[in-house]
Image (cartoon, rainbow, N blue to C red):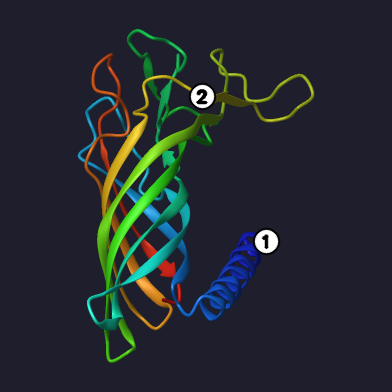
């Protein structure tokens, strides 16, 4: 826990220092933002048992165009990337299938540690940004994501209930580039902040998984903080 906290602090300090350097060099026309958030899996289908805590991270580099004659208000477009961790007590047993998915609930299974689906998206954000007295900042917009990778990770007993392998290591199973995950993500975003720290929210309109084939259904609501001087 301490290691993760120190890593997070170092990441925030490095990212904000880098962002300030970019802002100074480009007369505030270019912004680097770092999002740290939790994904709430809204309206899950009956075959999916989600966990409440689903930590994720995202970043973006945007160029800011003045809105009208005011330099305080801008329209921004750029490139970004986000990584999401959708934890669940339900495990996809056949993630490479092109047919129906087989799902198994592990909530009451002894030795179960965790299961997650982890998609990563390359994104194009489009934002409109407002300043109030140079301190309060409001940013609303939309982003389109294209999946650049996805994987699942499972830690727990195997099909026979065995918890460790022959060397005594807890069983881990990982699948990469799995099927049945939507290749596109369409989200609305909102940030309200003070100076370089903002509250962040994003809602994905389309589900994470493709509809059909017994796939889970839910829509992510990302809530967290953004570090970005703009």
Callouts 2 and 1 close, C-beta under 8 Å: no
Q: Residues within 10 Å of mark 2 (few under 14, many from 20)?
A: some
Q: Secondary structure at mark 1?
A: helix
Work out which residue is located at the far top of the displayed protein and give it.
Answer: 99
Distance, label 2 to label 1, CA atoms, is 29 Å
Residue under pointer 2: 177
In which quarter of the view is residue 75 placed? bottom left
* Foreground pick, 219 / 106: 219
- Which image quadrant: the N terminus? bottom right
Q: Is residue 121 among the parts visible in the rendering?
A: yes
Q: Could you tell me which residue is drawn at 47 percent across and 14 percent down?
A: 96
The residue lying furthest to the front in this view is 69
In the rendered image of this protein, does residue 65 appear above or below residue 58?
Answer: below
Q: Around disc 1, counting alpha carbons within 10 Å, would you say few (fewer than 14), some (14 to 19), or many (20 or more)?
A: few
**In the image, farthest residue toward the bottom:** 133
Q: Position of residue 221 (x, y in %)?
A: 28, 50
User: Residue 153 at x, y = what percent?
Assistant: 54, 31
Q: Nearer the viewer, mark 2 or mark 1?
A: 2
Q: Residue at x 42, y 10 (%)?
A: 97
Q: Is residue 186 above or below residue 69?
A: above
**Residue name at image x 48 percent, y 80 percent:** 27
Q: Which residue is nearer to you in this view: 160 or 83?
A: 83
Lateral position of residue 60 relative to residue 175, left or right: left
Name the element at disc 2: loop
Residue 116 visible in the current orientation: no
Question: What quarter of the picture does the C terminus occupy?
Answer: bottom left
Q: Where does label 1 land, which residue?
A: 3
Q: Earlier in the sequence, mark 2 or mark 1?
A: 1
Q: Position of residue 126 (x, y in %)?
A: 31, 56
Lateral position of residue 92 relative to residue 130, left or right:
right
Of 225 and 113, nearer the camera is 225
């Amino acid at each position: 826990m301490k290691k993760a906290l120190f890593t997070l602090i170092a990441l925030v300090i490095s990212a904000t220092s880098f962002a300030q350097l970019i802002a100074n060099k480009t007369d505030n026309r270019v912004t680097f933002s770092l999002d740290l958030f939790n994904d709430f899996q809204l309206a899950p289908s009956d075959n999916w048992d989600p966990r409440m805590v689903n930590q994720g991270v995202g970043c973006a580099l945007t160029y800011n165009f003045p809105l009208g004659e005011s330099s305080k208000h801008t329209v921004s477009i750029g490139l970004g990337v986000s990584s999401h961790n959708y934890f669940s007590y339900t495990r996809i047993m056949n993630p490479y299938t092109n047919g129906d998915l087989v799902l198994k609930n592990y909530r009451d299974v002894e030795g179960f540690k965790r299961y997650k689906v982890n998609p990563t998206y390359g994104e194009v954000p489009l934002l409109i940004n407002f300043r109030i007295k140079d301190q309060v900042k409001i940013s609303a917009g939309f982003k389109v994501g294209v999946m650049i990778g996805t994987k699942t990770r499972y830690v727990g007993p195997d099909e026979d209930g065995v918890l460790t392998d022959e060397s005594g290591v807890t069983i881990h199973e990982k699948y990469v580039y799995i099927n049945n995950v939507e290749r596109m993500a369409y989200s609305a975003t909102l940030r309200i902040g003070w100076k370089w720290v903002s509250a962040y929210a994003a809602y994905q309109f389309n589900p994470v998984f493709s509809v059909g084939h017994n796939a889970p259904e839910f829509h992510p609501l990302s809530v967290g903080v953004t570090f970005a001087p703009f």
